[in-house]
Amino acid sequence: MLIVMRHGANEEQIQNVIDTIKKKGRDAHVSKGDMHTVIGAVGANQIDPRDFELLDGVKEVLKISSSYKLVSRIFKPEDTVIDVNGEKFGGGYVGLIAGPCTVESEEQVEACAKKLSSYGVKIIRGGAFKPRTSPYAFQGLGEEGLKIIRRVADKYNMAVTSEVMEINQIPLFLKYVDILQVGARNMQNFNLLKELSHVNKPVMIKRGLSATIEEWLMAAEYILSGGNREVILCERGIRTFERATRNTLDLCSIPVVNKLSHLPIIIDPSHGTGLRDKVAPMSMASVAAGCDGLMIEVHDTPDCALCDGAQSLYPEQFKDLMEKLKKIAPVVDKKMSIAV
Ligand code: PEP
Ligand code: MN
């Protein structure tokens, strides 16, 4: 249930509504917008809307029929803007994340970061704990990988995103990483999501391989319901009958999510297509469709990559692509901070 306060409702009236929600055994979540303060009453107990309609300062009480509440546009009409190291996602900004699939060595990350930072990239990606389909494939360097990417990122004033796979890895990630990535395979690892709802760093949730948009938004709801409001949704393609590309990149999710939720949605065209030559066209289509950011795999020597080389761009290809995206973004009223 959402309690919408009148324009100009005072703090005392807002607090009275919060106290009433708590007395009824529910959690109160407050969203202060430009026009109205909205208070979400979230929890299992049934409550009567009339108990709130008569309170001072209340404009109206809305029942939300969707299963997600805090991530919905009804609760918070304004875009959530996530700012990491000066790179913004949402609110008219298209943020960028680029880097190798996996941290392989200090030299490899260094070669990549040097070029990417010279193009103006402010956030580098790189997995240290890798969810691999085969137990025989390279599993990542673990903590050593996180140390490497942090060291190199600091040298080039970059922020870091990397995938956290288990609850017991969270303290390590808080030490080395700026955005904690939840991989597609873990999108419904509810225990992990609950723990991440208490961290004070942004969480990026990749869409599950066969997840509906509603299930994906519910995963985000887990993070917001525990108090962490900084969530980035990342579309990375879903599994369909199509075999020409690694996944089917569902770009329809951009306008759908933009309408349903205030959270930024970014696109990963690398995993979405699995093929280097498809990454540029799908990135351009994503920006044209109104995405709030992109995460793109880039490797200095993709032919030698230990993981996902075939879908990784050469640095020069990435630079060319950024130049094109910078021209497309203003056509759809978006800004890109990258300085290529
Ligand atoms: C990744 O981004 O490194 C990754 C493993 O992606 P996904 O979880 O989307 O497969
Ligand atoms: Mn990858």
Image (cartoon, helix red, strand yellow):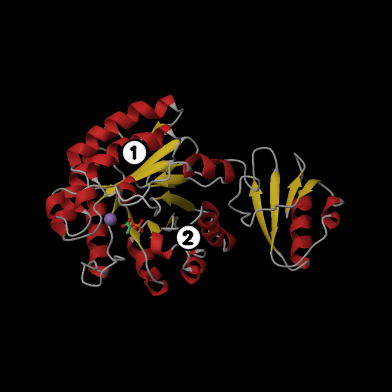
Check disc 1 and give the amino acid type: Ser
The residue closer to the viewer here, 123 or 295, is 295
Q: Is residue 72 left or right of residue 17?
A: left
Q: Which residue is mark 2?
A: 200
Q: Quarter of the image for the N terminus: give it.
A: bottom right
Calculate the distance from the C-alpha at mark 2 to the C-alpha at mark 1.
Answer: 30 Å
Q: Is residue 179 left or right of residue 147?
A: right
Ligand 1 under 8 Å from disc 1 Cβ? no
Q: Is residue 317 left or right of residue 204?
A: left
Q: Which residue is mark 1?
A: 283
Check disc 2 and give the amino acid type: Asn
Mark 2 crowdedness (10 Å alpha carbons): few <14, some 14-19, many ≥20? some
Q: Residue furthest front?
A: 241
Q: Compared with residue 36, is residue 110 higher up or lower down, i.e. above or below?
A: below
The residue closer to the viewer here, 172 or 204, is 204
At 37% from the left and 56% from the top, the residue drawn is: 178
Picture coordinates of residue 21 (x, y %)?
Answer: 75, 61
At 68% from the left and 38% from the top, the residue drawn is: 35
At 28% from the left and 37% from the top, the residue drawn is: 280
Quadrant assignment, res 186: bottom left
Instruction: Give the number of the mark in front: 2 or 1.
Output: 1
Q: Is residue 224 left or right of residue 145?
A: right
User: Where on the image, by quarter, is ligand 1?
Assistant: bottom left
Picture coordinates of residue 277 (x, y %)?
Answer: 23, 40
SS label for mark 1 = helix
Picture coordinates of residue 135 (x, y %)?
Answer: 25, 72
Quadrant assignment, res 96: top left
Picture coordinates of residue 110 (x, y %)?
Answer: 17, 52
Q: Quarter of the image for the C terminus: give it.
A: top left
